[in-house]
Image (cartoon, grey):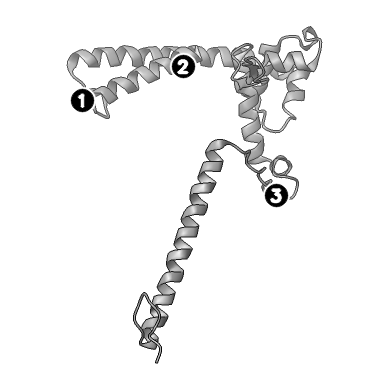
Amino acid sequence: MVTRRSSAKNSLDRLLEKWNVAWVADLPPFYQVQAAAQTALIRLLTDQIHVLEVAVRPALLESPAVQCLLWIPGIGRLMAFTIFLEVDDIQRFPTIQHFWSSCRLVPGAADAADRHRHRRSKDGNRYLKLAFSHAAVRAVQYFPEVRSGTSGGNGRSRSRSPARWSPRNSRRVSITSSRTTSTSTSSSRVRRSRGRKQRGGPVGRAPPSH
């Protein structure tokens, strides 16, 4: 229902964007009918979602598993409900690796011959991936102890690892070094010419001997 409501909201926004107006009343008459249908659908789905939340919320809050999830930083009631309902029975996963893989939290493999690459995996439960990713972001935002743990323990950002060598990087280094060398050479020539002008001799050759 939430997905369908989001789709209806996006359709209404695209309709207003198409005619470059901010209000439904500014649309042409035919498109006002379409916007009214989308608005009615949004209200209907919102009411149904509210009814389901009121009916399900008390039963879920009494669950010991949900109470344990609520103690984890970054996980609120909605995230706890989502994880509890989507996981169902944690005992069905033989290992923790199987659980993470089911949550789409393990990168996929895109290997070719002797080259090993990772790709974004689409295998698993997308709602669990969304719930854990959202919880991780909220934990870093609102819990200082989590933020300090992700920044190296002392509140400072970790130093970046040195870049790997590649032909492109080496070409950039060679171009930069050549430019630096040419700049320093031209600067030294300008300094020598200025010194000769101050001494009164001709520029570009040594002064004549007497």
Q: Secondary structure at mark 2?
A: helix
- For the C terminus, the quadrant is bottom left
Question: Disc 3 or disc 2, which is closer to the eye?
Answer: 3
Residue 198: percent from left, percent from top = 38, 86
Residue 126: percent from left, percent from top = 59, 15
Which kind of residue does numbered mark 3 sit on? Gly
Residue 118: percent from left, percent from top = 63, 21
Q: Circle 3 is placed at which residue position?
A: 155
Q: Classify mark 2: residues with Cα within 10 Å, few (<14), some (14-19) or many (20+).
A: some
Please state which of residues 36 and 54 is positioned toward the viewer in this rendering.
36
Q: Secondary structure at mark 3?
A: loop
Residue drawn 71% across the image and 33% down it: 73
Which kind of residue does numbered mark 2 sit on? Thr
Asked if the residue at tag 2 contacts the one at tag 3, i.e. Cβ–Cβ closer than 8 Å, the answer is no
Q: Secondary structure at mark 1?
A: helix
Residue drawn 36% across the image and 74% down it: 204
Q: Circle 2 is placed at which residue position?
A: 46
Residue 119, above or below 1: below
| Residue 26, label in figure | 1
Who comes first in sequence, dot 3 or dot 2?
2
Which kind of residue does numbered mark 1 sit on? Asp
Please state which of residues 121 and 99 is positioned toward the viewer in this rendering.
121
Q: Classify mark 1: residues with Cα within 10 Å, few (<14), some (14-19) or many (20+).
A: few
